């Protein structure tokens, strides 16, 4: 709970840094905004699209049934091994490692999207 709250707060913190530069003889002020996620943190829509693409590309899934709210077992008829394979494919897609304890909880697109979106190392 605390780490989710921390991630949520840090996602919105921006610390402006400014520096005066001399370019072609004239002074210019450069401003750079920093956050805990850097400039490359994924936006939510990108995470949604990529998670849905991973699930749609799974061999046992009918792509037309995949939505952000779809449950892997109840809606798509997948078994627990399929669930593990989808989570592994999501790890590969976003270049992150999901601990087994957390991976066991991811049984729908919505939970996968939230996990990846809140993970500071997802890329």
Image: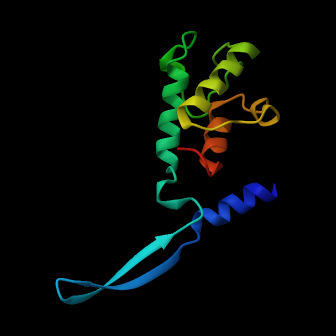
**Residue placed farthest to the left in the image?**
24
The image position of residue 54, as x and y in percent, is: 52, 26
Looking at the picture, tell me which residue is in the foreground, 101 or 69. 101
The image position of residue 32, as x and y in percent, is: 43, 74
Res 74 → quadrant: top right
Looking at the picture, tell me which residue is in the foreground, 37 or 56. 37
Looking at the picture, tell me which residue is in the foreground, 66 or 42. 42
Colour logic: rainbow
- 55 sits to left or right of 75: left
The image position of residue 95, as x and y in percent, is: 57, 37
Which residue: 77% across, 56% down? 3
- 102 sits to left or right of 22: right
Res 58 → quadrant: top right
- 78 sits to left or right of 99: left
Res 108 → quadrant: top right
Q: Is residue 81 above or below residue 3?
A: above
The image position of residue 16, as x and y in percent, is: 49, 79
Which residue: 52% across, 44% down? 123
């Amino acid at each position: 709970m605390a780490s989710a709250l921390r991630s949520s707060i840090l996602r919105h913190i921006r610390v402006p840094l400014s520096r005066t530069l001399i370019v072609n003889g004239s002074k210019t002020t450069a401003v750079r905004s920093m956050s805990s996620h850097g400039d490359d943190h994924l936006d939510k829509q990108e995470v949604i699209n990529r998670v849905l693409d991973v699930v749609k590309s799974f061999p046992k899934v009918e792509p037309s049934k995949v939505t952000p709210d779809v449950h892997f077992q109840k809606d798509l008829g997948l078994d627990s091994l399929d669930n593990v394979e989808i989570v592994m494919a999501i790890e590969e897609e976003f270049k992150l490692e999901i601990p087994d304890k957390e991976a066991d909880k991811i049984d729908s697109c919505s939970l996968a999207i939230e996990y990846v979106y809140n993970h500071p190392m997802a890329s």
